[in-house]
Image (cartoon, helix red, strand yellow):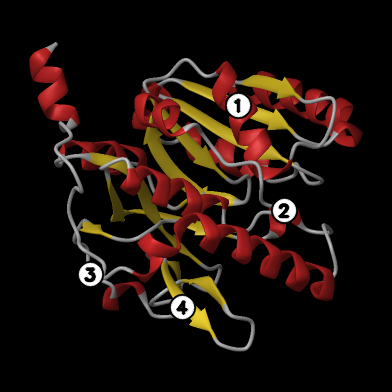
Amino acid sequence: MSVIVPLYKRYDFMEHQLLEFLRDPGFLAQGELIYVIDDPSIRADVLFEADRLYHLYQIPMRIVASPLNRGFSGANNLGAEHAKGEYLLFLNSDVIPIEPGWLEHLIAAFDEEAVGVVGARLLSADGGIQHAGMDFDYLDRFGIWRNIHPGAGLAPEFDGRELRDVRAVTGACLIIPRSVFDQIGGWNMGYLLGDFEDSDLCLAARNAGYRVLYQPLAELTHLERQSFSGMADDAFRLRMTICNAVRHQARWRDEIEAPFAPGPAATVPSARDMRAQA
């Protein structure tokens, strides 16, 4: 298992994450932690902080530094190039586990049939649901399909605790087998400023015959967009979102507009089946 955390502009959430990792024996036993510096201006500070945190908490970590800003997809792909795990967990630096065991719940979902991607339940700082799977909604004004988060703002008890199929999950906390990641070509680098890469990845997995699952038993807090603060003003972000949406629907319009059919699109073995065959 490889946990890949990109860092851009801010790195002050590292210690908060590490404190939660430290009290989770399951996490500590799973494998490697990789921080990807995607901002050359913070490289020296992150290296100093990583050294301080290692000596303080003794949690092994790898630091991968890019000489330039690659963007969300590029940073994740760079981390994956250096990862050794059978599974790749992509995690934003401002996503903080709530209690131990969340990673085991995510991995256990791969024992279901033909699973390619699994996402967690993310809560806002006030405890309301921020993410419980993604769907798509058509905006007549712009002629585009946008990503939406059904159930956002609800109390978690209204969401249920059943593992279930969804169209997509957020890239803020997403796990995928290395074999599936390589098969679909990793994160698409054609999007700007952190929009639609996650749904693109999920739709690529579904197009290859895999299921995308939402695991509400894996629960974390997401301080949304804190890890990417200062990137652009609202007007510029809106223009980039529209550009990204146009690219996204050009690639996946048929999948987006088709009725959602839970379950595998093709016969793909489960992780349990593959272990039994090994």
Q: Is residue 197 left or right of residue 261?
A: right
Q: Residues within 10 Å of mark 2 (few under 14, many from 20)?
A: some
Q: Is residue 48 left or right of residue 249?
A: right
Residue in the foreground of this view, choosing between 32 and 89: 89
Q: Is residue 261 left or right of residue 82?
A: left
What secondary structure is marked by label 2? loop
Of callouts 4 and 1, which one flags the residue occurring earlier in the amino acid sequence? 1
Give the labeled residue for mark 1. 79
Of callouts 4 and 2, which one flags the residue occurring earlier in the amino acid sequence? 4
Of callouts 3 and 1, which one flags the residue occurring earlier in the amino acid sequence? 1
Give the residue type at disc 2. Answer: Leu
Say which of marks 2 and 1 sits in front. Answer: 2
Give the image location of residue 64, x and y in percent. 70, 21
Give the residue type at disc 4. Answer: Asp
Q: Which mark is residue 137?
A: 4
Of callouts 3 and 2, which one flags the residue occurring earlier in the amino acid sequence? 3
Q: Which mark is residue 192?
A: 2
Query: In what quadrant of the picture does the N terminus appear?
Result: top left
Query: In what quadrant of the picture does the C terminus appear?
Result: top left
Image point (32%, 40%), residue name:
208
Q: Which mark is residue 160?
A: 3
Image point (66%, 54%), residue name:
194
